[in-house]
Every structure is written in C-alpha cells, then in structure tokens.
Amino acid sequence: MLELAILGFLYDAPLHGYELRKRITALTGHVKPVAESTLYPAIKRLEKADLLARATQPGSVAAPRHVLTLTETGRNELCRRLAEPAQRDITDENRWFTVLAFLRHLDDPSAQAAVLRRRLAFLEEPASFFYSGDRPLRAEELDDPFRRGILTIARATSRAELAWLRATIDSLDAGSP
C-alpha cells in the first residue's frame, strides 16, 4: 500500500520526501500514520529498483532538498499494480481506497472497469462481522445495539459503494468518464 501510494503521488508530480509523507498521511494516515522510518526505506527500495529517481535542489532557506520523480519504469509499474491489484487490495477497504485514489492513471477504461468489477464481486458476496455458525447475521437479528450499529453502518456504506461501482462501471463501459 505504501509503495503504491508513493508511485501514485509521484505520477502526479515530483515531490520531496516531506511533502510526499504529508500526502500519504492525508490519504491513509487515519489508519496507520506513516513514519519516516517506514517511508524512507520504501523510497530507497523503489529508487534501487529504478522506479523513482532522486535529484538534489537547493533549499530556499535551509539545507538542499531531495526531490523524487517517477521514472518511466515507475510509471509502468504503477499501471501494472493498478491493473492487477492483489486480492487483499480489493478486499481491504483501506488498501482499496489507495488503489481507487490512483486508478485514473490507468489509461484504459476497460482495465479500470475490470478492477471495479473485482471490487463489486467481492461486495456482492454475503458477509458480516458476526456469524451464527457459518451463517452471516443481519443487523435485525442482533439484540446488542452496538453490534447492530456496526452492521447498519456497514450496510449503508456498502449500498452506497455498490451503487457508485455499478454507475461507474456502466459509464466506463459506455465510454464516458
């Protein structure tokens, strides 16, 4: 998820590490803050794989800044990861949001629709946070108001996402953005 976010934000524009960290935190920080001890090793891995490049620019007030840019190889890798996301990137809501944040960089509407169809198929499977044996429980079956609340909120969120997915897939299939 972190590498995808790095590649995605650098696809938009060259950034220095601090600005990149701010943007990633804005996208995913509510789930897990991005520590420098996590971000900079990921940047070094991507740089070593020739997915991004680093250039030194003079600082306006302080020390020189390292500006990161996406290489052509990095652009191709981002598009590959977007076109073929791992199953956990489809099923985990937070990872899904990272994919969704950059899916516009995939130029092919049919490829975009294929990714959305995978999410749609996942959401259409019966699921719950709570089960009776192997059977998913519905909110109406629970006496606990807090667990009922979880299921009620999840149902509303899922319905909204399902409606958006179907409409967006139809739009992509029709050739309009």
Image (spheres, rainbow, N blue to C red):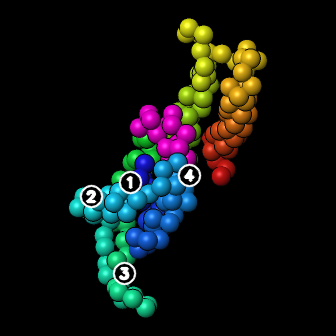
CB-based contact (under 8 Å), mark 3 and mark 4? no
Q: Locate residue 146 relative to residue 1 in the image: left or right.
A: right
User: Disc 3 residue type?
Assistant: Arg
The residue under label 4 is 30
Residues rendered magenta in the picture: 86-103
Q: In which quarter of the image is residue 128?
A: top right
CA distance separating discs 3 and 1: 21 Å
| Gap between marks 3 and 2 measured at Cα | 19 Å
Q: Which amino acid does label 4 sit on?
A: His
Q: Name the residue under label 2.
A: 45
**Mark number, residue 65:** 3
Helix, strand or loop status at disc 4:
loop
Answer yes or no: is residue 45 visible: yes
Closer to us: mark 1 or mark 4? Answer: 4
Q: Earlier in the sequence, mark 3 or mark 1?
A: 1
Question: Residue 60: where, in percent of width, then height?
Answer: 43, 90
Q: Are circles 1 and 2 on residues that touch, CB within 8 Å?
A: yes
Q: Can residue 159 be seen in this view?
A: no
Viewer-nearest of labels 3 and 1? 3
Place of residue 79 in the rendered image (x, y in percent of width and height, measured from the top left): 42, 52
Alpha carbons under labels 1 and 2: distance apart:
9 Å
Residue type at mark 2? Arg
Q: Does residue 93 show up magenta in the picture? A: yes
Q: How many marks?
A: 4
Q: x%, y% of residue 106? A: 49, 52
